[in-house]
Image (cartoon, grey):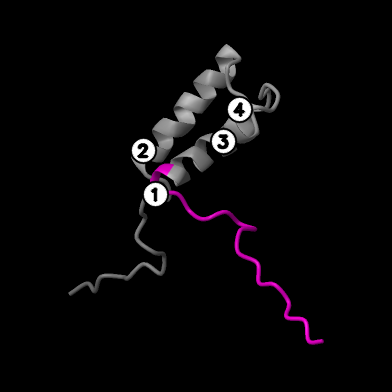
Amino acid sequence: MATKKRSSRKSSRRKYGKAAGKRVESAMRRRKRGTLRSGKGGRGGKVKSREQAIAIGLSEARKKGAKVPAKKGGRRKKAKRSS
């Protein structure tokens, strides 16, 4: 009898949800058209870089509640001051 070998890796799951992918897609499309703008309320300049477009798409997805991992530098603990 052959015994089944267990995989040490986790079962693969989607890191980003479908809705998040759609948001990033639309951000990329807007970047191509030249209508994607950075900053709060789109008051910044035109977005030209691909990475920035992806970041904007993911942050929009996060705001809408899509499955997106938290930002890497998002949660930093503040050092307590004793005075």
Q: Earlier in the sequence, mark 3 or mark 1?
A: 3
Q: Earlier in the sequence, mark 2 or mark 3?
A: 2
72 w.r.t. 25: above or below: below
User: Are discs 4 and 2 less than 8 Å apart at CB?
Assistant: no
Q: Position of residue 42 (x, y in %)?
A: 61, 27
Please tell me which residue is depicted at 35% across the width and 39% down the height of the picture.
18
Please tell me which residue is depicted at 73% across the width and 77% down the height of the picture.
79
Residue that label 1 marks:
67
Residue lying at the far bottom in this picture: please name it: 83
Q: Amino acid under label 1?
A: Lys
Q: Name the chief secondary structure element in magenta.
A: loop
Residue that label 4 marks:
42
Q: Which residues are magenta?
A: 64-83
Q: Secondary structure at mark 4?
A: helix
Q: Amino acid under label 3?
A: Ile
User: Are discs 1 and 2 less than 8 Å apart at CB?
Assistant: yes
Q: Earlier in the sequence, mark 1 or mark 2?
A: 2
User: Are discs 3 and 4 less than 8 Å apart at CB?
Assistant: no
Q: Amino acid under label 2?
A: Ala
Q: CA distance from mark 1 to mark 2?
A: 8 Å
Residue that label 3 marks:
56
Q: Earlier in the sequence, mark 4 or mark 1?
A: 4
Q: CA distance from mark 2 to mark 3?
A: 14 Å
Residue that label 2 marks:
19
Q: Position of residue 65 (x, y in %)?
A: 39, 47
14 w.r.t. 56: above or below: below
